[in-house]
């Protein structure tokens, strides 16, 4: 086991065989349409969103530590932002793209440096303002941004951001226009995109996989139910967890996808159905789900952690996602 793998493996929690949804310390305030990813120290960074239905986007940024089960305030955004996408890059910085920026939608891109606790503006994302899109960091360190509403139109546009050149590159378009979908990167380097509003507004169970080596898309087994505005992250064992969201089925449903078998398994449901929540995988391989919109004007600051003995990080997974290891 290399040093990176050892660091994550020795920080992993050993769970009993029972699957659990553990309630954790609530967010400092209600929040939905925010963005979330996990930092190199294993904490989850939650950025922006809304605290009230129909209110102004938040500038506040908070980080959750599983070790202390507590939230800490971080450097605020210069301007409130919501309905954006976010992922942690291979150098430990966090890339936050587009969304509602202040009072209007934007192409603006910001980078958060946890070492200096500061924000930097990066090259804007083309070709137009974008929101309700999805994003994950690929194995080569680039960030893949897919779909969303681009210029208020449902879009199949796909872009890749390189931090080394601070530039964007167009990639193969999604097979169909899509917004409000989920996305995460798998062990094999492909990106899994799930659900959302597809083809002009229909909520879908459709699942697609993007292969950066061939710049192409492949259809995978659909989710058990249609779903949008859900949480998604790749777990410690390499499976994908999809949680809650707006659905024609159970809005509090939780499902686990195995890339090995290309199949879905139903997991323990959340106590209350939410949509527009945040989700990321912590350094111990578990998933943290934060906040969201229960229905209409009702929001929540609830935080829950999905744990199971089957999702603890393997050595290979730890090496692949080395930036999640505690240093």
Image: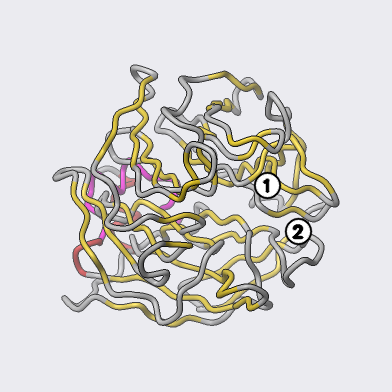
Q: Is residue 68 magenta?
A: no
Give the x, y percent position of residue 137: 47, 38
Quarter of the N terminus within the rendering: top left
- Kindly identify the residue that appears in the image at 68 percent across and 29 percent down: 125
| Labels 2 & 1 near each other (Cβ < 8 A) | yes
Name which residue lies at 31% across and 48% down. 318
Label annotation for residue 123:
none
Q: Is residue 27 above or below residue 202?
A: below
Instruction: Give x and y (percent) for residue 322.
Output: 39, 45
Residue 75's disc number: 2
| Rendering quarter of residue 32 | bottom right
x, y percentage for residue 288? 45, 67
The boundaries of the magenta stretch are 312-327
Question: In the rendered view, does 131 fall on the left or right side of 182?
Answer: right
User: Along the line of sight, which residue is nearer the eye, 3 or 102?
Assistant: 102
> Number of marks in the image?
2
Residue 119 x %, y %: 75, 46
- Mark 2 / mark 1, whichever is N-terminal: 2
Other residues around mark 2 within 10 Å, as few (<14) / some (14–19) / many (≥20): some
| Dot 1 alpha-carbon crowd within 10 angstroms: few under 14, some 14 to 19, many 20 or more | many
Secondary structure found at label 1: strand
Instruction: Give the residue at x 58% y 27%.
Output: 161
State left or right for residue 84 relative to residue 273: right
**Viewer can see residue 57:** yes
Q: Which mark is residue 112?
A: 1
Quadrant of res 253: bottom left
Tell me which residue sits at (70%, 54%) in the image. 82
As drawn, 126 above or below 259? above
- Asked where in the image residue 140 lies, by quadrant, the reply is top left
Q: CA distance from mark 2 to mark 1?
A: 9 Å
């Amino acid at each position: 086991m290399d040093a990176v793998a050892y660091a994550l493996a020795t920080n992993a929690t050993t769970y009993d065989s029972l699957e659990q949804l553990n309630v954790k310390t609530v967010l400092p305030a209600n929040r939905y349409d925010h963005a979330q990813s996990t930092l190199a120290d294993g904490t989850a960074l939650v950025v922006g969103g809304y605290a009230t239905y129909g209110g102004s986007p938040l500038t506040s940024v908070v980080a959750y530590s599983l070790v202390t089960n507590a939230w800490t305030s971080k450097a605020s955004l210069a301007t409130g932002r919501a309905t954006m996408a976010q992922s942690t890059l291979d150098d430990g910085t966090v890339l936050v793209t587009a969304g509602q920026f202040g009072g209007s939608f934007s192409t603006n891109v910001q980078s958060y440096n946890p070492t200096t606790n500061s924000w930097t503006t990066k090259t804007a994302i083309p070709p137009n303002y974008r929101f309700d899109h999805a994003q994950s960091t690929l194995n080569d360190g680039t960030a893949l941004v897919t779909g969303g509403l681009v210029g208020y139109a449902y879009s199949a546009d796909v872009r890749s951001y390189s931090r080394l050149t601070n530039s964007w590159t167009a990639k193969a378009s999604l097979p169909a226009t899509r917004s409000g979908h989920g996305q995460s990167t798998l062990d094999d380097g492909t990106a899994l995109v799930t659900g959302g509003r597809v083809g002009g507004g229909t909520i879908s169970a459709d699942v697609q996989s993007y292969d950066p080596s061939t710049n192409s898309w492949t259809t995978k087994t659909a989710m058990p139910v249609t779903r949008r505005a859900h949480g998604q992250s790749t777990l410690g064992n390499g499976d994908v967890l999809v949680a809650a969201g707006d659905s024609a089925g159970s809005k509090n449903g939780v499902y686990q996808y195995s890339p090995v078998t290309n199949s879905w398994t139903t997991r323990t449901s959340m106590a209350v159905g939410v949509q527009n929540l945040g989700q990321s995988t912590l350094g111990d391989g578990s998933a943290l789900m934060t906040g969201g919109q229960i229905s209409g004007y009702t929001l929540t600051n609830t935080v829950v952690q999905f744990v199971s003995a089957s999702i603890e990080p393997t050595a290979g997974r730890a090496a692949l996602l080395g930036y999640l290891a505690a240093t």
